[in-house]
Amino acid sequence: MPAIDRYAVFGSPINHSKSPKIHRLFAEQTAQSLSYEAQEVKAESFDEAVSAFFAAGGKGLNCTVPLKELAYRFASHKTERAERSKAINTLALQADGTILGDNTDGCGLVRDLLNNHRIMLAGKRILILGAGGATRGILGPILEEAPSELVIANRTVEKAEGLAEEFECLGSISGCGFETLSGRQFDLILNATSASLSGELPPLPEHLLADEGSCYDLAYGNEPTAFVRWGIVQGTQKSLDGLGMLVEQAAEAFFIWRGIRPQTYPVIDLLDRERKSR
Ligand code: NDP
C-alpha cells in the first residue's frame, strides 16, 4: 500500500491551531487521503525541522508565527505574491525535489471579503491598521482589486510609510500614523495589528467609518475581538473577524498541494457554530 501523503503546520505556539481540523475536513470533503498534523517548531530549529520533514517524505507545510520570514528564506523558489510579501505560509514539494514557497494569506482575505461577505473592494476607500507581516501579505492582493485609495496607519509611522513606498507601483497607497486619521472616512477598515489579541485597540477617531462601511479584524477568537466590538459600536452591519480568512488561506494551500479546491463555506460555518456553542 502506498504511504499516505503527509502535511503539517509548524509554529510556536501551535497547540490551539485550527489548521489540522480544517485540512481534515477538506480531505474528507474532497475524498483525498492525507494526514496533517501540528508541530511545535521554534525559530532556532526551523531549518532542521523543515529539512527533516521533507527528507522523511513530507509533501507540504504551512508555517505560522514566528516562522513565515524563515520559510521565505528556506524556499528554493517563490511565487510572485510570496516575493512581494517577503513571508511564506505554504511550502510545497515539487516533482523535481525543490520546495516552492507561496503566501496564501492575502488571497484568503480577499476571497473571504468578496465571496463570503460580499464586501467589494474596487473603487473603495480602504484603511489598514498595522504594518507588520500580515499587512505586507495582504497589500498586493488588495491593490489588485483596484480600491480608490489604500491607507496604512501604524503606531510606528515609518513602517507604514516604508510599506506604502514599496507597494506604490501597484496602486494608490499611503502610510501615516493614527493621529492623522482625524476627519477622514473609509468604506472598509481592516485591523491587522496584533492589539486585538490582548484586548486592546489602536486609538481611532470618531466617524472614521463611512455610512454602510464594514470592519474586519484579521485576528479571530471564540469571543468577538476588541476591534469587532468597536465596529459594532460604529453601527456597521458587517463587523467581522478573520476566521473566514483562516479557512480561505488554508483552502488555497490545499489547492496548491492537491490541485483540488475544497468548498470553504461548510468549514467556516462548522467552526463558527462550534465557537458560538462554547
Ligand atoms: P506583527 O507582529 O508582524 O505586527 C503587529 C502589528 O500590530 C504592528 O504593526 C504593530 O505596530 C501593531 N501593534 C501591536 N500592538 C499594538 C497596539 N497595542 N496598538 C497599536 N498597534 C499595535 O503581526 P502580524 O502582522 O503577523 O499579525 C497581525 C494580526 O493578524 C494578528 O492578530 C494575527 O493573528 C492576524 N493574522 C490573521 C490571519 C488569519 O488567517 N486570519 C493570518 C495572519 C495574521 P508597530 O509596528 O508599531 O509595532
Image (tube, helix red, strand yellow):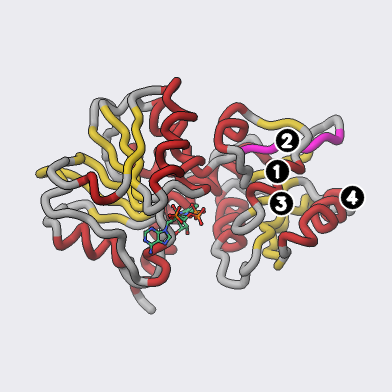
Q: Which residue is mark 2?
A: 100
Query: Do callouts 4 and 1 mark residues in contact (Cβ within 8 Å)?
Result: no
Residue named by callout 1: 91
Q: Residue at x 57, y 51 (%)?
A: 26
Q: Quadrant of the C terminus?
A: bottom left
Whole-percent x and y of residue 274?
A: 41, 70
Q: Which residues are magenta?
A: 97-102
Asked if the residue under mark 1 is in contact with the one under mark 2, i.e. CB atoms within 8 Å, the reply is: yes
- Badge 1 local density, few (<14 within 10 Å), some, or many (20+)? many
Residue closer to the observer: 108 or 133: 133
Going by the numbered disc 3, the residue's amino acid type is: Ser
N-terminal-most mark, 4 or 2: 4
Residue at 69% from the left image edge and 38% from the top image edge = 101
Sequence-first tag of 4 and 1: 4
The residue lying at 70 percent from left, 67 percent from top is 40
Label 4 or label 3, whichever lies nearer to me, is 4
Cα gap from disc 2 to disc 3, whole angstroms:
22 Å
How far apart are labels 2 and 1 at the CA level?
6 Å
* Residue depicted at 16% across the width and 47% down the height: 182
